[in-house]
Image (tube, rainbow, N blue to C red):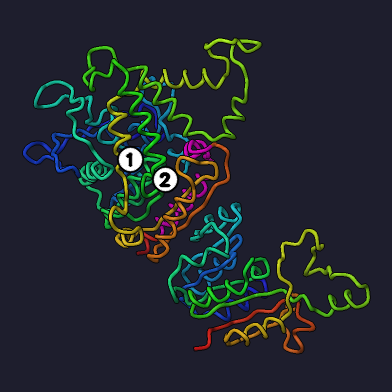
Amino acid sequence: MTPLDLNNIETQYFTFAHPPDELILESKETLGPITLAYETYGELNKNKSNAILVFHALTGDANAAGYHTGAKKPGWWDAMIGPGKAFDTNKYFVICSNVLGSCKGTTGPTSMSPKTGKPFGLSFPVVTIQDMVAAQKCLIDHLGIKKLLSVAGGSMGGLQALKWAVIYPDYVASTIAIATNTRHTAQQIALHEVARQAIMSDPDWQNGDYYGKSIPARGLALSRMIGHITYMSEQSMEEKFGRKLIGKERLGFDFSHDFEVESYLKYRADNFVQRFDANSYLYLSKSLDYFDLAEDADLKTVFSKARCSFLVISFTSDWLYPSYQSKQMVKALKANDLDVSDIEINTNYGHDAFLVEVEGQSKLISHFLDRISKEITYA
Amino acid sequence: MRTDHKIILDFIEPKSKVLDLGCGDGTLLSLLFQKKSCRGTGIEIDEKAIYECMAKGLTVSHGDIDTGLADYSDKRFDYVILNESLQQVLHPKKVILESLRVGKKIIVGIPNFCHVRARFQIFFQGRVPVTKELPFQWYDTPNLRFLSLKDFRYFCRNNAITILHEKGIIGQKTICCRPNLFAHTGLYLLEKQT
C-alpha cells in the first residue's frame, strides 16, 4: 500500500512479453522479455476508475513523486503529484513508468541481452513512442485498469499522452498534453542530431560497446549542454546568468570559464553523465525524431480516432516546442468536435516551464480533472 | 443576475450547444450550463480569465475572436454568443458572418454609442461622450468600433441577416420605446436569411 504522504516510495517492476510472446515493435522487430520500472501513488478505487497515467520527459524516470528511502530529492513531478496537489493522490491513483529504451530500470540498451548475456548496446532495437505506449498498455492491463481517468505529460511525455489518445481511445477519458507537439520538426531533429553526433564522436563511445569500460562522458556531457540550452529561453538565461563572471573579477583572456553560464552548463552536464546512459540518450532522442502522429494522413483524420477530452498547455517562451504547434493541434481537435481546453501560459522559463510553472498548471489540471471525474461518475 | 444575461438565457432553448466568444470569467456560460442544461465552450483572450473558467468546470480556449472561429465546421453550435465583445474585434463583419456560419443562430450584445446622454455631450459640450456605461477616454478605450442600435439594424439588413429579437436595456431594465435613443445596450437574436 502506498503511504499517503509519499515517503519511502519504492519502484516496482513488471516483466512481460516472455518469448515466444515477444512485443512486436513498430520496426517489426521483436523484443522480450521486457521489464517496466514503475511507481504508483494514492489508492486505486474499487471500480478502478481513478487511475491517471503520467509520462516522463526524455531523461526522466519512474520516480515522479515522493521520496525513495534516504533520497534527498523528491521525484521529478513532485510539485504536481501528491496529497492536495494538481494530481491529488487523496483522490487519484497515479502511475508513472520508465519508458522503453531508457536506463532507469526499464529494458533498454543497458539491459542484458538474453541472447548474448551481455548488455544490448546497439543490438537493442530502435524503439518508438508507439512502442513505449504499447508497453505501458501491457502494464495497465496487468493492473486491471480498463479506463484511465487521464493520460498526462509534458514534452516527450506529451507525445506519449497523444499517442494513447489515438491508439487506445477506449482506455482514455482525458488527455493532458503540455509543451508538446504532434510531430518532431526539422529544427528539433537537427538539435537532436547534433547531440547524437556529440556522443558518437567521443572515442570512448566504441560503437555503443563501452559497458564495463570507460563511458563516453565528454560526448554525453556535450549533448546534455546542447539540450539544456534548448530547455531555457533567452530571457530566462539572461535573468539567471546575464554576463556574470565566475570565480574572477575580470575576463581571463584564456579558455577557462569566464562566465557563470559556462560553468552552469558544465556542472549540469557532469551531473547528468553520472545518472544517464549515452546509448539510451541516442535511442530516446531517435524515438522523438521518428514521432509523427499524423504520419501519411492529416492531423484532423488522426484525431478523428480520439474520443476523450483534452487539456492543451503551452508556454510563450518555449522555442523547442513553440506554442503555435500546440495551437495547430487544438485546431485539429476542434475540427473533430472534441472537447478541448487550451491555454498559452505567459512565462519566461522556456521549455522548462512545464516543470517550473507549478501554480498556474496546478489550478488548470486540478479543475480539469475534477470535471472529468464528475463526467465519468454521471455517465 | 445581470439583465443582459437574463435576456440571453431567455433567448436560448434548453440543452443547446453554445459558443461564447469573449466569454470572460465564464459567468454567462456557467449560467447557461446550470439553468439551461446547455453544453459548449468559450473563447477568451485573457489568460487570467481562462483560469477562472476552468475553476467553474468549463471548457475554454485561449485565443482571439478574430481568428478563433475558423477552427469550427458549419452549424456546429446552436448559438454563438458575442456579448460585449463585438465592439472590440478587428473585423466585426467577418466575425458576425463567421459566427452565422458555425452557429445556427447568434446572439449579439452591443453598447449604444448614440444614447441620449452621449448625443447631449456631443451636441452641447462638443466632446466625444464619456458616460457611466461608456467610461473610456478616447486615448484608453478598448473599443475599436462605435455604433448605435440603428447602425446595427442597417448592417443586418444589408447583409441578409434576420433580426429575430431586439432588446434594449437601460441599467437593470429592458425598454421597448425608442431603444436607439434610450437604451445603453442592445441585445439581438439573429439568423442568416436562407
Q: State the residue lying farthest toward the right.
A: B124
Label 2 CA crowd tier, 10 Å (few <14, some 14–19, many 20+): many
Tag 2: amino acid: Thr
Q: Main secondary structure of the magenta part?
A: helix
Q: What x and y, as percent, mark residue B28?
A: 59, 68
Closer to the chain start, of discs 1 and 2, is 2
Residue A1 is at least partly visible in this image: no
Identify the residue shown where x is 51% and y is 76%: B79
Viewer-proximal residue among B11 and A280: A280
Q: What x and y, as percent, mark residue A194?
A: 38, 30
Q: What x and y, as percent, mark residue B105?
A: 52, 80
Identify the residue shown where x is 27% and y is 32%: A283
Residue stretch rendered in magenta on the structure: A350-374
Q: What element carries label 2?
A: loop
**Contact, CB < 8 Å: mark 1 with mark 2?**
no
Left or right for B143, reference A275: right
Placement of B142 over or under B115, stated as above or below: above
The residue beneath circle 2 is A180
Q: What element carries label 1?
A: helix
The residue beneath circle 1 is A289
Left or right for B129, reference A269: right
User: Which chain is indicated by disc 1?
Assistant: A
Identify the residue shown where x is 62% and y is 23%: A243
- Badge number at residue A109: none
Co-location on one chain, circles 1 and 2? yes
Residue B10 counted in the magenta span: no
Question: What's the distance in space between the residues labelled 1 and 2, CA to CA?
Answer: 13 Å
Left or right for A90, reference B107: left
Q: What x and y, as percent, mark residue B78?
A: 48, 77
User: Which chain is indicated by disc 2?
Assistant: A
Placement of B116 over or under A138, stated as above or below: below
Residue A120: quadrant of the picture: top left
